Image (cartoon, rainbow, N blue to C red):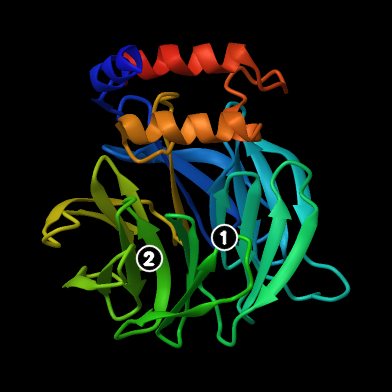
């Protein structure tokens, strides 16, 4: 244990070197850029308007408004597979938000439907409902939060159906993100609302000058996207603007993918949270722990991750 703690303490680093910002919009085109610079380039395409984005450790998952989810290989920039979340019982599912937790993909629809999908096989395991339009969702501390134009935020344990009231915002909610400790919800009135994820306590609100159509975190900063394509980097504590960039096309969804293996939880930092997150997935034989990409989860993955963790980013 002593040696383990020495390794953990020595490995803390900031993970910014190879991070990529992905954005998607109504044209069905995925664009990518260095999140510190901008200068967007082609990153892939889908068959319909992109409403949501997620990352499974190997692919960017782009959910379009027709219910299709495209698996886009980040190394080549085109879909290597696709699956649909529409079926006879729900022919209008439109992928308004997506999140991945362990082996589970959670996807939502504008009629309040929540799909639980096996992230490896892409089969629909279950469907739950809340009684409002869902336009934003985020996973934090084992809970799945959903929100929408009603201004209400509800939550349940990941994979469970008992959604309960969490809080409410002062405007219609269209985006959500977390820094691992707090929750951030973006309303179309241009305001971001911040809550403590553990207690639900309101923390602060601040104006963004955008319509908050998408949120993401990078290197400790909050990225706020306007539907017009402007992205504002902000201090999440004060709401102060740090910098701006412009995609050049409308934005519906935004995603940060870190190229740093040691940053397992994709928070932008390499610390003990990453080690324990990897260890939990490794013990559960979760596909995200397949660091080597050989389809197996074994000691090769453990030592590859440990080396990356010690090196930092």
Residue 295 location, quadrant: top right
Q: Residue at x 61, y 51 (%)?
A: 62
| Element under disc 2 | loop
| Residue picked out by circle 1 | 158
Counting from the top left corner in percent of width and height, residue 21 is at: 40, 42
Q: Residue at x 79, y 44 (%)?
A: 121
| Element under disc 1 | loop
- Mark 2 residue crowding within 10 angstroms, few (<14) / some (14–19) / many (20+): some
Locate residue 74 relative to residue 85 in the image: left or right.
left
| Residue picked out by circle 2 | 228
Any part of residue 49 in sight: no
Locate residue 260 relative to residue 35 in the image: left or right.
right
Relative to 115, say whether 254 is above or below.
Answer: above
Q: Dots 2 and 1: beta carbons under 8 Å?
A: no
Q: Quadrant of the C terminus?
A: top left
Counting from the top left corner in percent of width and height, residue 114 is at: 65, 70
Mark toward the start of the polypeptide (2 vs 1)? 1
* Nearer to us in this view, 55 or 74: 55
Locate residue 294 relative to residue 180 in the image: left or right.
right
Any part of residue 260 in sight: yes
Counting from the top left corner in percent of width and height, residue 170 is at: 29, 86
- Mark 1 residue crowding within 10 angstroms, few (<14) / some (14–19) / many (20+): many
Residue 150 location, quadrant: bottom left
Q: Residue at x 76, y 49 (%)?
A: 122
Query: How many numbered tags mark residues here?
Result: 2
Q: Residue at x 78, y 52 (%)?
A: 83
Give the CA separation, mark 2 to mark 1.
33 Å
* Nearer to us in this view, 257 or 237: 237
Q: Quadrant of the N terminus?
A: top left
Residue at the farthest right position? 88
Locate residue 2 relative to residue 111 in the image: left or right.
left
Counting from the top left corner in percent of width and height, residue 91 is at: 81, 75
């Amino acid at each position: 244990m002593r040696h383990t703690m020495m390794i953990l303490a020595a490995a803390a680093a900031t993970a910014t070197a190879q991070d990529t910002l992905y954005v998607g919009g109504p044209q069905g085109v995925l664009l990518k850029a260095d999140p510190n610079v901008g200068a967007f380039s082609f990153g892939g395409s889908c068959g319909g308007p992109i409403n949501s984005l997620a990352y499974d450790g190997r692919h960017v998952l782009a959910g379009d408004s027709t219910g299709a989810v495209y698996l886009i290989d980040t190394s080549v920039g085109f879909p290597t597979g696709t699956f649909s979340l529409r079926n006879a019982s729900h022919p209008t599912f439109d992928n308004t938000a997506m999140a991945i937790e362990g082996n589970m993909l959670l996807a939502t629809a504008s009629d309040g439907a929540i799909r639980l999908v096996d992230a490896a096989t892409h089969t629909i395991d279950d469907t739950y409902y809340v009684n409002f339009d869902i336009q934003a969702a985020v996973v934090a501390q084992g809970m799945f939060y959903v929100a929408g134009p009603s201004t209400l935020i509800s939550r349940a344990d990941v994979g469970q159906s008992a959604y309960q009231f969490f809080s409410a915002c002062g405007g219609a909610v269209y985006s959500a993100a977390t820094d691992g400790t707090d929750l951030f919800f973006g309303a179309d009135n241009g305001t971001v609302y911040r809550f403590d994820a553990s207690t639900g306590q309101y923390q602060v609100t601040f104006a963004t000058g955008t319509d908050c159509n998408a949120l993401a975190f990078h290197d400790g900063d909050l990225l706020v996207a306007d539907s017009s394509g402007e992205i504002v980097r902000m201090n999440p504590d004060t709401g102060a603007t740090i910098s701006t960039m412009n995609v050049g096309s409308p934005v519906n969804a935004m995603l940060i993918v870190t190229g740093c293996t040691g940053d397992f939880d994709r928070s932008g930092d390499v610390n003990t949270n990453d080690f324990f997150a990897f260890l939990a997935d490794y013990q559960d034989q979760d596909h995200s722990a397949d660091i080597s990409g050989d389809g197996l989860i074994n000691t090769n993955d453990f030592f590859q991750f440990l080396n990356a963790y010690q090196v930092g980013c």
